[in-house]
Amino acid sequence: MQHLSPAPLRLSEDEIMIEAIAIRKEFTTGALHVQALKGVDLRIARGEVVAIMGPSGCGKTTLLNCLSGLDAVTSGLIRIAGRDIRSLSDRELTAFRAREMGFIFQTYNLLPVLSGLENVELPLLVSGVRAREARARAQASIEWVGLTRWARHRPAEMSGGQRQRFAIARALATAPALVWADEPTGALDSITSQEIIDLMLRLNREHGLTFVWVTHAPEVARQAQRLITMRDGLIEHDSLQTAARQSLSPQVPENGGMR
Ligand SMILES: Nc1ncnc2c1ncn2[C@@H]1O[C@H](COP(=O)(O)OP(=O)(O)OP(=O)(O)O)[C@@H](O)[C@H]1O
C-alpha cells in the first residue's frame, strides 16, 4: 500500500510523537466536580505501541481524548508530532487530526447506512481527497485488512471482527502516523480479538505507525511494547515489556529514556 509509507517518513527517527506536560482535566456537572486528570506527564516516541490500563474511572479515556484533541485540557501542554495542539484553531485541529491520526473504538463507529467501502472513503472525502483517489485508497486499505469481498456490505451484515477490520481500514486510509484505539477488542471474542491485535502490530512493524491502546484486557496489553497503568487521574507505572520488545522492528529505537 503505497500511500501508507510517507506518513512515518515525515518524522525523523528520534522525534517524539506525543508529549504531554502537566495535563489536567476537570469536569463540572452541576455541583459535581471531577478531577479526571491530575497532572499527567508523558512522552511517546514514534513507532511505539503503548497500552494504557487501570481501573474503571481512573481517566484512561479522558487521557486519550485529551491527547488526541477530541477534548480540551483544563491546563497543560500537549504536542503531537511537534505541534502544540492548543495553539491550533478548531478548524486547524480537525484538519491536523484527519491528517495525522486514526481512531479505532470498541463500538466501531461505522455509519450503518453506508457500505464498508463508503465508510472507509468518508474521512478521505471529508478531508478533501478527490473521489477517484479516495476510492482507490479505500480499496487498498480494505484489501490490506483482507475484506475486499465485503466492501459493498453494510455494517449490519458483518460480524464484529469484520466491522473492526473495516474500522482499521478507515483509520489507515488517511495514512496517519498515529492511531488511538479505545478498547479496540472490547466487543470481540478472544480469537477475533487476537486477529485485530495482529493487524495493528503488523501496521506498526511494516509502516512504523504509533499506537496507543486503552484496554481492560491484560492479554491485549501484554502485547504492547510499553505498558502504562493509571490510577485516580495519574500515571502509576510506566514500563517497557520485555517479551513484546523483542518484536520491535529494527528501525524503531529503544525508548527507555523517553518517559
Ligand atoms: N464528560 C464527562 N463529564 C463529567 N465527568 C466525566 C466525563 N467524562 C469522564 N468523566 C469522569 O472522569 C473520570 C474519568 O473517566 P474516564 O472515562 O476517563 O475513565 P476510564 O478510566 O476511561 O474508565 P472506564 O475504564 O470505565 O472507561 C470519571 O470519574 C468520570 O466519571
Image: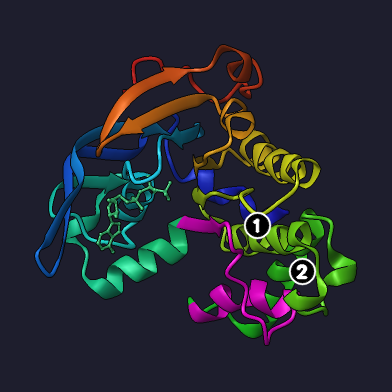
Q: Is residue 46 visible from the viewing direction of this image?
A: no
Q: Which residues are magenta?
A: 101-126
Q: Are marks 2 and 1 in contact (CB under 8 Å)?
A: no
Q: Residue at x 38, y 69 (%)?
A: 95
Q: Is residue 59 visible from the viewing direction of this image?
A: yes
Crowd around label 2: few <14 · some 14–19 · many ≥20 (10 Å): many
Rendering coords of residue 196 (x, y %)? 71, 46
Q: Nearer the viewer, mark 2 or mark 1?
A: 1
- Depth check: give the residue in front, 252 or 73: 73
Q: Residue at x 22, y 64 (%)?
A: 88
Q: Which mark is residue 168?
A: 1
Give above or below for 57 relative to 160. Answer: above
Q: Residue at x 45, y 34 (%)?
A: 53
Rendering coords of residue 137 (x, y %)? 69, 67
Dot 1 lies on which element?
A: helix
Q: Is residue 227 magenta?
A: no
Residue found at the far bottom of this picture? 113
Rendering coords of residue 222 (x, y %)? 59, 25
- Decide which of tag 2 and tag 1 comes sooner along the chain: 2
Dot 2 lies on which element?
A: helix
Ligand 1 near label 1 (Cβ, under 8 Å)?
no
User: Where does the N terminus fall, quadrant-wise?
Assistant: bottom right
Q: Which residue is mark 2?
A: 139
- Depth check: give the residue in front, 209 or 221: 221
Q: CA distance from mark 2 to mark 1?
A: 13 Å
* Left or right of 245 in this view: 70: left
Crowd around label 1: few <14 · some 14–19 · many ≥20 (10 Å): many
